Amino acid sequence: MKNQAVGKIGEMIARETARKRHYAVKDINVRTPYGEIDLILEKNDRIFFVEVKTRTSYRFGFPEEAVNQEKMSHMIQNAEYYLNDRQLSDKGWQLDVISILLDQSTQLAREIQWIENITADE
């Protein structure tokens, strides 16, 4: 299965997971001058900018390990751009990662890990 197809399946799984957790899906695959935001959610008047990482094995490490310091920097720039562009700067927000291990034969998630507030100092 090609990486793009794996990524799209992962994004669909992430959206469904978010809906089951009572998040409103605000936007998907939003392009900004700084890159792309996979998933934008809202819950309890807070905006969540979510990077979805999907892999079919741990051969190259855990999916979430692909979110390095440079990627986080781009995520912050994307989030700030989106909030300013849509005049939502007064909203609380955070960056999350949804990590998915996909079963290649069934195209179902074997594991889903939602990592919240990845830039928190705590």
Image (cartoon, grey):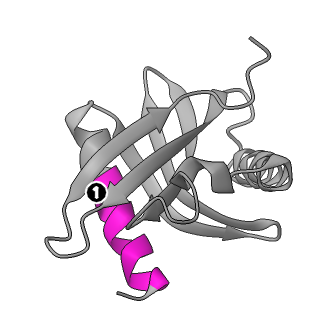
The residue closer to the viewer here, 58 or 45, is 58
Q: Is residue 9 magenta?
A: yes
Magenta stretch?
A: 3-14
- The picture quadrant where one finds residue 121 is top right
Q: Which residue appears at 66% of the width and 57% of the height?
A: 66
- The picture quadrant where one finds residue 112 is top left
Q: Main secondary structure of the magenta part?
A: helix
Q: Which residue appears at 13% of the width and 71% of the height?
A: 106
| Position of residue 45 in the picture relative to residue 78 (left or right) | left
Give the SS element for disc 1. helix
| Position of residue 86 in the picture relative to residue 10 (left or right) | right
Residue 36: where, in percent of width, then height?
66, 67
The answer to whether residue 51 is visible is no
The furthest residue to the top: 122
Q: Residues within 10 Å of mark 1 (few under 14, many from 20)?
A: many
The furthest residue to the left: 106
- The picture quadrant where one finds residue 17 is top left
Circle 1 is placed at which residue position? Answer: 13
The answer to whether residue 72 is visible is yes
Label 1 amino acid?
Ile
| Position of residue 114 in the picture relative to residue 83 (left or right) | left
The C terminus lies in quadrant: top right
Q: Is residue 49 magenta?
A: no
The furthest residue to the front: 59
The residue closer to the viewer here, 84 or 39, is 39
The furthest residue to the bottom: 2
Residue 50: where, in percent of width, then height?
55, 47
Q: Which residue appears at 34% of the width and 87% of the height?
A: 1
Q: Which residue appears at 70% of the width and 53% of the height?
A: 82
| Position of residue 91 in the picture relative to residue 57 (left or right) | right
